[in-house]
Amino acid sequence: MEFYPDSEPARRAHIRMQIEVAAYYINRQKAKGKKRRDIERKINKAVEDWNLEWGKGPNYFDLHGMTLQGAKAFVARMILRAKTAKLYFEVGRGNHSWNGIPVIKWGLINDYRKAISVCDWNHGILVLNVSKVLNGSY
């Protein structure tokens, strides 16, 4: 079972966000310092805004396109806002990542160790146990 935007407006918004993020990544290639950080903020904001407005579910977030630091910050904010015991983060398997390494996936697994696991039915999704994080047992 995977979650996809279930309406035409949501699908269109997702495509617009992907195009916007791709353009930011092109601009980021040669950017340095503050300009690069500003572009990365825009990348992460575009993905976050899409998730909060059009997301695939109330406790399901698609982190594709985010930078590692942006994804970590977003996950931390979603933990504080969580109203469910589990949060699902679509991070992918690394198929389209540089050298096939799923950087966000391994970054989150490293940060949340015992509170996060790879989903049984889709290895590109991480399942985070909110109470373990809030209790500090990770």
Image: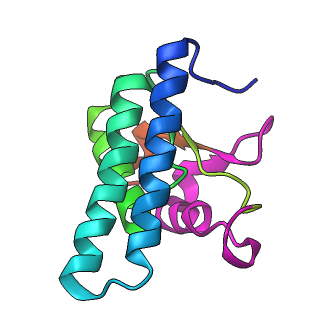
Instruction: Specify the farthest residue to the right.
Output: 121
Q: Position of residue 138 (x, y in %)?
A: 47, 57
The boundaries of the magenta stretch are 96-125
Specify whether residue 119 is painted magenta: yes
Residue 5 visible in rendering = yes
* Colour scheme of the rendered structure: rainbow
Residue in the picture at 80% in, 34% down: 121
Q: Position of residue 38 (x, y in %)?
A: 22, 69
Which residue is drawn at the image coordinates 46% and 37% (left, top)?
16
Q: Nearer the viewer, residue 10 or 117?
A: 10
Residue at figure coordinates x 55%, y 14% from the top left: 8
- Residue, x 24% and y 87% (percent of image)? 33
Q: Is residue 24 above or below residue 80?
A: below
Find out whether residue 101 is within the magenta segment: yes
User: Of all residues shown, which one is farthest toward the left?
Assistant: 34
- 11 or 59, which is in the foreground? 11
The image shows residue 58 at horizontal and vertical percentages of: 43, 21
Badge count: 0
Can residue 87 be seen in the rendering of this structure? no
Q: Nearer the viewer, residue 136 or 93?
A: 93
Determine whether, in the image, residue 78 is placed left or right of residue 8: left
Relative vertical location of residue 24 with respect to residue 50 in this rendering, above or below: below
Q: Quadrant of the N terminus?
A: top right
Horizontal side of 84 relative to 53 (left or right) equals right
Residue 94: x percent and y percent?
A: 72, 62
Q: Quadrant of residue 89?
A: top right
Q: Is residue 54 above or below residue 41?
A: above
Q: In the image, is 80 to the left or to the right of 126?
A: left
72 relative to 32, above or below: above
